[in-house]
Amino acid sequence: MRFPSGPESNAMSFGRDDIGWTPIMEEAQRATRVLHPDELDLPRPKNRRIITVANQKGGVGKTTSTVNLAAGLALHGLKVLVIDLDPQGNASTALGVEHRGGVPSVYEVLLGEISVADAAAKSTQSDNLFCVPATIDLAGSEIELVTMVAREGRLKEALNAEAVEALDFDYVFVDCPPSLGLLTVNALVAAHEVLIPIQCEYYALEGLGQLLRNIELVQSHLNPALWVSTILLTMYDGRTKLADQVTAEVRGHFGDLTLRTVIPRSVKISEAPGFGQTVLTYDPGSRGSMSYLDAAREIAERGAERKTA
């Protein structure tokens, strides 16, 4: 057996087949790439991209995808705002942002009492990542919004304010509740793009037709510029034939709208919110972390290839 010597003994230079390679070493290298990215690596969009993450089906990875994609972009130097429009406040939790009662939140923003800039809090995950949290007050907001003038456009009005322009965000992600109610409609009216997460499981496409019909209604009557820009496959389990079948069906139906990257089913992704973190900071070398980082890169590169509204 030949042992390496000299400069070649640097383990970082070894490939998988060399004696210096170990699984732990590979994971350390991957973690290093996540925690110390090249800030110039991802292109900045020509105009701010406002992306609503929607799917009325619960448990498909909406919030998980929102916070991890946002964190992936922020770690590469892009300035990102997450608007937590789900009364459960899970996105706020994952980003380490306080969302107890009385904290300035998206509820007051929708009512017009404060601006987005006043409600936005810096995430513990990155200096470039901010979140407008959701508190329990948001649970009853749909009832209050019903009586308001232009109730479908409250979020759009807030995002067009001069205060948001001054903050100069590159990306705004809106995390929707698992419903097609007034909060989700507000998110669709305010956005330029829709990102739909679809889990690689049975019944994955069930109910998707209703979401697409709602998007078409919003396009027709409230936001002609809205379009479905991205389909993200989540909870992929390569051990099952079903996952491959769903993946093929989704790619066949949506074509190039579907990201090449798929998000694997991962314990680390599920654990991270319990520690008030995204998976990119909780376990940066994991498959889940690298997958979300790759998906964020795809989204950024696709956005740079076209003119954004």
Image (cartoon, rainbow, N blue to C red):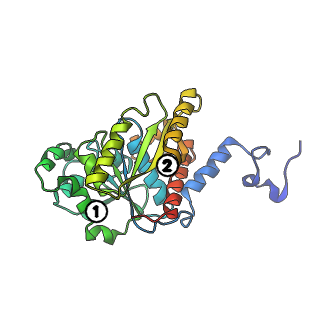
At a point 48% along the width and 66% down the height, the residue shown is 44
- Label annotation for residue 257: 2
Gap between marks 1 and 2 measured at Cα: 26 Å
Q: Secondary structure at mark 2?
A: helix
At a point 65% along the width and 43% down the height, the residue shown is 24
- Is 196 left, or right, of 20 in this rendering? left
Which amino acid lies under the numbered mark 2 shown in the image of this protein? Answer: Leu
The residue at which mark 1 appears reads as 159
Q: Badge 1: few (under 14), some or many (20 or more) residues near its Cα, within 10 Å?
A: many
Residue 16: image quadrant is top right
What percent of the width, then of the height, locates residue 218?
Answer: 29, 50
What percent of the width, then of the height, locates residue 268?
Answer: 50, 39
What percent of the width, then of the height, locates residue 184?
Answer: 28, 46
At a point 32% along the width and 70% down the height, the residue shown is 165
From the image, which quarter does the C terminus lie in? bottom left
Q: Badge 2: few (under 14), some or many (20 or more) residues near its Cα, within 10 Å?
A: some
- Label annotation for residue 280: none
Q: Secondary structure at mark 1?
A: helix
- Disc nearest the viewer among 1 and 2: 2
What percent of the width, then of the height, locates residue 227?
Answer: 39, 53
Which amino acid lies under the numbered mark 1 shown in the image of this protein? Answer: Leu
**Between residues 11 and 142, which one lies in front from this camera angle?**
142
